[in-house]
Amino acid sequence: MTAASERRVSTLVDRYLPAVRERMRASVPIVEGDVFGILRYHLGWQDSEGRPASEDSGKGLRAVLVLASCEMAGGQWREALPAAAALELIHNFSLLHDDIQDQDATRRGRPTAWTVYGLHPALAAGNAMRVVADRTLLALSEVGAPPETAAAAAAALTSRYLEMIEGQYLDLSFEESDEVTTGEYLDMVSRKTGALIDCAMHIGSLVATGDLRTAAAFGRCGRELGLAFQIRDDLLGVWGDPAATGKPVGADIRRKKKSMPIVHLFQQADPRQREWLRSAYAADEVAGGDVESVLEMLADLGAREFVQSTAAEHAAAAVRAIEGLPLGAEAKADVHAMADYFIERDK
């Protein structure tokens, strides 16, 4: 990643994210001792005792993309703030439920909500967060969006988070299968990760222009960025620097995640290798020595290079998706920077 791309993305985050977080806080009711306390814990706003905590609610990239897309398309980014906050709440709703489905014990350096409050209360909190997101989006009309634009934004958000849930279901279904193809995997990722990033850029540009064709082009850009982002995430889950990711090399192998490197390995392995892989992946967790063996097989296959080149293909497709739009040089530079960042980030 070039230093210029990293600086440009950091500038976008610094420009937009504080306002998004302020809007999110205003959207979550302050009621002590109830489901909204679980939301505030999950979002990093308070500790398990209800005391204020230093905020760490994630990168905020989806919300940033809503506002950046609005401005790229010639709009006033503050008019898209309700949509940006809603997208970030939907993303966090998905993470809360993901933690339960994956039985993850930690997120962002502290215990996950379901391990602190219990499985059923955490499920209820996730459902509540989704409703809060829907209600937050309704405020678009209060900041100047025409009724038809607000309705189209609501329809886009609903369809995309349904896609996200479909993708999560497919991801779960892959866990017990060693017959997943790369195409099937990419379809799952397009839904699970790509749908909300598509939605972010679609809605941001829609608020700016009210034009569905422009919004569709921005959405295609976001979909491809989402694919590039997730594929790079898969690479980091296997080969990432522990100092940057906070996870040991091969962490996703140990956890038996059917990420892109492993899907590619199962597809390309010869019958003997595939039989060994099935045996290694039959345990609850891939053993330490077997993790090293899988890493060696991936290296022999050139899997890291294959995964990175696939991420780069989708990043390039994201840039192409907006080439026909009448955008200024700065807007196009922002898209290039985001595409570069998504495939070169180290955490």
Image (tube, rainbow, N blue to C red):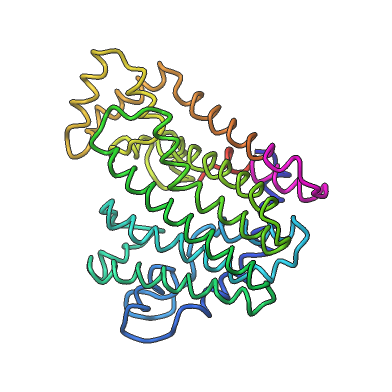
Q: Which of 111/199 is in front?
A: 199
Q: Most extreme residue toward the bottom, as rendered?
A: 31
Q: Which residues are magenta?
A: 319-339
Q: Is residue 6 above or below residue 268?
A: below
Whether residue 318 sits left or right of residue 327 in the image: it is left
User: Residue 266 at what x, y percent from top left?
Assistant: 32, 23
Quadrant of the image for the N terminus? Answer: top right
Q: Is residue 304 above or below residue 203?
A: above
* Tally of numbered tags: 0
Q: Which of 58/313 is in front?
A: 313
Whether residue 250 sits left or right of residue 88 in the image: it is left
Q: Residue at x 69, y 44 (%)?
A: 337
Magenta region's main secondary structure? helix
User: Residue 151 at what x, y percent from top left?
Assistant: 58, 68
User: Residue 306 at what x, y percent from top left?
Assistant: 49, 24
Q: Residue at x 70, y 51 (%)?
A: 214
Whether residue 37 sits left or right of residue 117 in the image: it is right
Residue 338 falls inside the magenta stretch: yes
Q: Most extreme residue toward the front, as rendered?
A: 148
Q: Is residue 202 above or below residue 25?
A: above
Q: Which of 79/141 is in front?
A: 141
Displayed quadrant of residue 295: top left
Q: Which of 181/147 is in front?
A: 147
Q: Is residue 143 above or below residue 239?
A: below
Q: Residue at x 49, y 29 (%)?
A: 307
Q: Residue at x 31, y 26 (%)?
A: 292
Residue 81 falls inside the magenta stretch: no
